[in-house]
Amino acid sequence: MHKTFIMKIKIWVFLIPVAGLFASASCHKDTAPKLRINNLLYKSLEQIKAEIAGTWKFQYDSSNGFGGPQRNPHTPNTYYTNNSFITFLTKDTIVWTVNGNLFLRDTATTTKIRYSPYSDSVYLFVYAQGAYAWMMDQIRNDTLVIEAGFLSGGGLRYYLTR
């Protein structure tokens, strides 16, 4: 009788944690939002223009650092502050405003280039006689990622939201 009582205790000592494990695993809900990536690199020029059409607000930029992309701090008087907006209009026109003032209005020259990190050709949007050369990289959830800095060796990315 004493041995069966000890066996029952051993079984319960084993079953209670296992049951708790199953219960907690079945109740766990994944509350993290799903990352949606809309890759623009290999789309047609018309598809890219349709995806980026409209007004976007600068949030921040990043550049390549020792450990990968590093978010860059901004000062209030830079052209990519939170009061900076870019509007992509029809006919390849861009309107860039900073603090409500016109910073740039230009028409892009688009060209297809081979860019080394990618195995295929990508479209490059060039503004202001080459002062700005941008590759529309992707839209991550609601954020447009523009790869810039081609004239200075690359590695600069702008992050904009609608």
Image: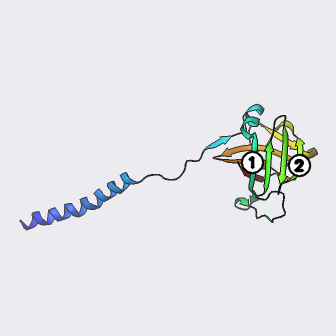
Q: Going 84% across and 51% down the picture, which residue do you hit?
A: 97
Give whichever of 140, 6 is nearer the camera.
Answer: 140
Amino acid bearing label 1: Trp
Label 2 neighbour load within 10 Å: few <14, some 14-19, many 20+: some
- Distance between the alpha carbons at the discs numbered 1 and 2: 14 Å
Give whichever of 100, 37 is nearer the camera.
Answer: 100
The residue labelled by disc 2 is 104
The percent coordinates of residue 74 (x first, y second) are: 78, 64
The percent coordinates of residue 116 (x first, y second) are: 78, 43
Amino acid bearing label 2: Leu
Left or right side of 125 for 70: left
Mark 2 lies on a secondary structure that is: strand
Vertical position of residue 127 compared to residue 58: above or below: above
Q: Going 77% across and 48% down the picture, which residue do you hit?
A: 147
The residue labelled by disc 1 is 56
Residue 47's tag is none
Question: Between disc 1 and disc 2, whose residue precedes?
Answer: 1
Outermost residue to the left:
1
